[in-house]
Image (cartoon, grey):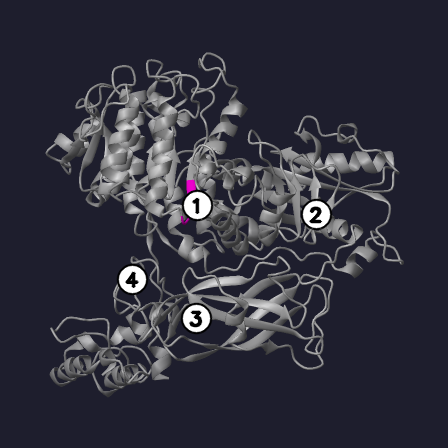
Amino acid sequence: MVLTAAASAVTYPTIYKWDLRLTYSWTRNLQYDTHHMAVGLQGLANREAPRVFLIFDDNDEIWFNRITEEGGVCHGWNVVNINNIQHYIELLSPYADGVVLYDQSPDTGVISTSLVATSAAAAQGCIALRNDPNSGVYKMLVTNSTGPQLPVKIDLTGKFTGSGTIWGTSRQSTGSAKCDAYIWLVENYIKQGKCDPAKLVYNMDLWGLKPEVRLDHAQLRNLDYAFSRKAVCFELSPWGDEPATDDPGQPVGTDLETFKEILDECNVQTGQSEMIKFCGFVNWAYKYTDYASVGGSHPPVASEWEIVRVISAYNAYMEGDALDMTYVSNTSFYNGLKPALSQNRYVQNPAPGYQDLVDRGFIDSAGNVVDNNYIMMYLGDYDQVSWMLYWLGCDRWQDAQRGNVYCNWALTPNSFDRAGVAMDYMYRTKSERDFFTGGDTGAGYIHPSQLYGQRYPSGYSSGVDIWQKHCEDYYRIFDYSITAWMLNAGSGPLKLEHADMYAPFSGDGIGFNDDLNSPILRSNVPVIERNGPDIYNDNIQASALGITPNSGVNFHWYRSILLYPNKLKELEDECNSLGYDYQFVDAFTFYYLLRHHLGGNNHYRASWTGDDIPDILETSQTYPARITVRNDGWDSWSRESNYWLAYTIVPRGVEPEHADYDSRGRFGIAEGTVVNSGESFTFDVDIAAPSQPGEYDIYYDMVRDGITWFSVANNIEWKQPLTVVDDVYTVDTDGDGMPDVTENEYGLLFWHPDDGVCGDAGYLEADVSGADGSPDCYVDINDIKKCTWYWLSQDQDCDITGPQLSPDGVVNIYDIAVIASQWLRCNDPQNINCW
């Protein structure tokens, strides 16, 4: 009873929310300065944990309500509404060590300094500020005696001229003041390891202050992620055959050479050992294209392809934020929620079993696919965070017909970093007819042929291995096994070797953009070319599909762009009214049927639906755990048929061999039990921790002994990180003084330092003293001594409980009993902190 009474209520973190919609009546310069300042302080405040949420438009309000509603990741958190700009600065300026100044005008200054200043400021824990001493924002931050008077750490204004020696370096000028500023960033920050070389933000520079640019297209709100992650920010033309349209006086190709140098130096820092995130998209309406009065010679789509071609050669993938919704807010906040979202298990709706397809009339009694035109509609283009959050999450996802038609949403899973809340929301609100696939060539937009071979212009060795590992990690999070659209636009034709490259993480299907005459099996993976044309809301009709009715067994898939489910429902209704033999299906039905029709097998498929393996293990200890697996294949699992589960633990970053699994043994299905298609089974597993402390990964996989491992059959195995220590109470991820295991036990957040202090959880509520007389987050002999003194002196400071299990106004034997019991609960006589 005493132990039960010791538990206390959870203290939640606070979200500081500022509504910036009020700024849209201000002057353009003041809006610009305010927004850049706001996201700078937001990113710095959110660097350690998600704290600040900004409302730029109604869509931000929608997402704020979703994350704080019941079931949302921030449900129950406290909210403090910030009243005005002065309140915001007073509250958050302590997170900034100073300011980095950049040129004040796009007409008289160097436009790139705004992004260079953002990168340098993020690296130094500062904010970037336009150098206009008359600006109200400048005054409030720097000069006013009533403000924080932040020091100017660096002033980039007037420093870059396009001639001589580049300021702050020993490098000769590139001949472009714009590019010289980026060379300064390379020499002083990227080469020095001060920025995160795996995070690039391709963003509108100071050009966005020009009156012809819509202010939301200036992309200032995108930069909070850059501030939080110390990203490298830039905007350069990908074309080497003409001067950049925003810098026409530069030598031809200077932008591209600078672009390549940034990419190359980032790869030097990573050792070419990981894929680099490239957030952004060519701002085709304003730069580097032949659109309207921009002044370039290349079409917008070609410019998009050229950027992707170049960055793919440098181990980078695009996470586009394209016009029209090129803007995206609060990604530093969403990124800060990743530790919480990573605790969730995201599982797709079940794939169809053989009998399911018989019952639906798709397979006949002889086992043959029934004559029909089987149609899968690919719903894109959600290869970017902005479109996923706003055009899908705040619009198409709310369509009344969603749930009445099969929707195959192509959400690129790498968006988890900046929009994990969108993925989380869609998985927890999906209908039985919502399915998810990879789009735009996997976990990010690349050109596959640029991962190997000559890799012009980088000349790097193959990046296939790091790309496969990158995709496997993201596909695994969301139970993906289909890459529904691969394209190689601008880099040559797709080849079957590209399908082989994708097979390990796309075991249930691959959709080619073109270059494949008829469907084939490649390592038992069905591969099929898409049908044209692209489907839009205004051209979706039966005649546009180009299909001949009653023509046997045919498979067709179409790429649609921003399609509403109600439009898809209208198409299905039209086909039904015409009596066509058109069957609209989900992606798994489509590819399972296609594989069966082509003579392949739908065996050895599994979804990893959950486990209770602790994240922190003590060296050499054994932990009983339960792992639940769903059979997504057409084979039946049993001990008698030699189906087993196996696991291994390897040092972080090491790829396991089958022998590593073998050394741990097998864990079987109960004798006499058969796990049929669509059914789940929970394995009882003893997890033996390594004898040496360190960072590890645990993998588990299914195997049919003597036949195959499921991963060899292109079903991605499960993987999750483990921390192994001599004493689990020494791990304190968020540095708040409470061990992770204690916070997990009492419902606190092991990853957020603002969810309470010592005394908020369990046995720690009796922590009143340490060796120096102040609480130390441990219940030990010092607390017994102090509370005994309180008892004898009748001081009420140690009143915890009474006969009715609530404080009774005096300190007596009941309180001593609580403290003693909590002390004994430590259960680790080897831990000096529990003595």
Question: Considering only order in the chain, which callout, 3 or 1, is on the residue closer to the N terminus?
Answer: 1
Mark 4–mark 3 distance (CA, rounded to whole Å): 23 Å
Identify residue for label 2: 586
Rendered view: 278 above or below 815: above
Specify the amino acid type for callout 4.
Gly
Q: Mark 4, mark 3: which one is toward the viewer? A: 3
Q: Which residue is mark 1?
A: 275
Residue 39: in magenta span: no
Q: Nearer the viewer, residue 134 or 359?
A: 359
Could you tell me which residue is drawn at 81 percent across and 53 percent down? Answer: 360
- Element at label 3: loop
Give the magenta-colored segment's residue range. 273-277
First reached walking from the N terminus: tag 4 or tag 3: 3
Please tell me which of labels 3 and 2 falls first in the chain. Answer: 2
| Three-letter code, disc 2 | Asp
User: Residue 294's spot in the image, x, y percent?
Assistant: 44, 15
Residue linked to disc 3:
614
Which residue is identified by label 4?
756
Element under label 4? loop
Q: Nearer the viewer, mark 2 or mark 4?
A: 2
Q: Residue furthest bottom?
A: 813
Rendered location of residue 389, percent (x, y): 50, 40
Q: Main secondary structure of the magenta part?
A: loop
Q: Look at 35% across and 22% down and name the residue there.
A: 254
Please tell me which of labels 2 and 4 falls first in the chain: 2
Marks 2 and 1, how far apart at CA: 31 Å
- Mark 4 and mark 1 lie on one chain; the one further toward the N terminus is 1
